[in-house]
Image: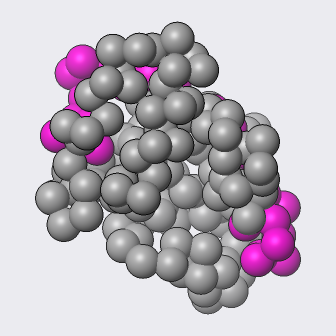
């Protein structure tokens, strides 16, 4: 069975689930999902990315998003939703909320599960990507498996969000 470690920051949409579960054709896939709650240190970068995408209203609301311990419960809900969606699509899946040192946790999970790849599924982060500070760029230097970066689809109104 092919094993993918899937790093996410928002709940998976149906389009995301279809995308990641069909990457390897009909081969069975096992996922380990790592979900990281939002942190206050990333607020400025998120606001700049929102402005770059022309989403001025979202940039103004960055300060209203739960962070730190307040973001843990929404992250747990997003993780539970995402794991269930992957299982409903016929894949094996389990997950963890990562509160600290996500790249160290990633390396440990890759080693422990003997993962075949890492998939970083994220919204565009122009500033971080430009300076190679995004998860995918940094993960490539931490794990000994291929790292694939994919852009997530917009969250539907009916789905739980990482923000609540």
28, above or below 102, in the image: above
Q: Which span is picked out in magenta? A: 139-164
In reply to whether residue 154 is colored magenta, the answer given is yes
Give the residue drawn at x 78%, y 53%: 132
- Residue 133: x, y in percent? 70, 56
Please name whichever residue, 60 or 138, is drawn nearer the observer in this view of the structure.
60
Expressed as whole percent of the image width and height from the top left, the position of residue 35 reads 41, 59
Residue 8 seen in render:
yes
From the viewer's perspective, is 55 left or right of 127? Answer: left
Q: Residue at x 50, y 78 (%)?
A: 101
Residue 4 in the figure: left or right of residue 40 = right
Report the quarter where the C terminus lies: top left
Residue 154's x, y, as percent?
Answer: 44, 22
**Callout count:** 0
* Quarter of the image that includes the N terminus: bottom right
Q: Is residue 14 visible?
A: no
Residue at 41% over, 14% down: 56
Q: Is residue 130 left or right of residue 15?
A: right
| Of the pair 28 and 3, the residue shown nearer to us | 3
- Name which quarter of the figure residue 106 lies in: bottom right
**Mostly what secondary structure, the magenta segment?**
loop
Q: Position of residue 16 (x, y in %)?
A: 53, 32
Asked if 23 appears above or below 30 in the picture, the reply is above
- Colour theme: one colour
Q: Residue at the location (76% across, 77% down)?
A: 142
Q: Within the magenta stretch, is there residue 42? A: no
Residue 39 versus residue 160: which sits nearer the camera? Answer: 39
């Amino acid at each position: 069975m092919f094993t993918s470690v899937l790093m996410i920051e928002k709940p998976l949409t149906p389009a995301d689930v279809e995308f990641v579960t069909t990457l390897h054709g009909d081969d069975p896939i096992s996922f380990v999902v790592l979900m990281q709650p939002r942190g206050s240190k990333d607020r400025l970068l998120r606001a700049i990315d929102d402005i770059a995408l022309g989403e001025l209203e979202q940039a103004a609301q960055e300060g209203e998003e739960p962070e730190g311990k307040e973001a843990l419960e929404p992250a747990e809900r997003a993780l539970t939703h995402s794991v269930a969606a992957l299982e409903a699509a016929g894949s094996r899946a389990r997950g963890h909320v990562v509160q600290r040192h996500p790249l160290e946790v990633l390396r440990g999970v890759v080693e422990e599960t003997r993962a075949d790849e890492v998939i970083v599924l994220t919204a565009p982060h122009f500033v971080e990507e430009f300076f190679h500070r995004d998860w995918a760029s940094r993960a490539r230097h931490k794990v000994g498996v291929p790292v694939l970066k994919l852009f997530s689809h917009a969250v539907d109104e009916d789905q739980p969000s990482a923000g609540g």
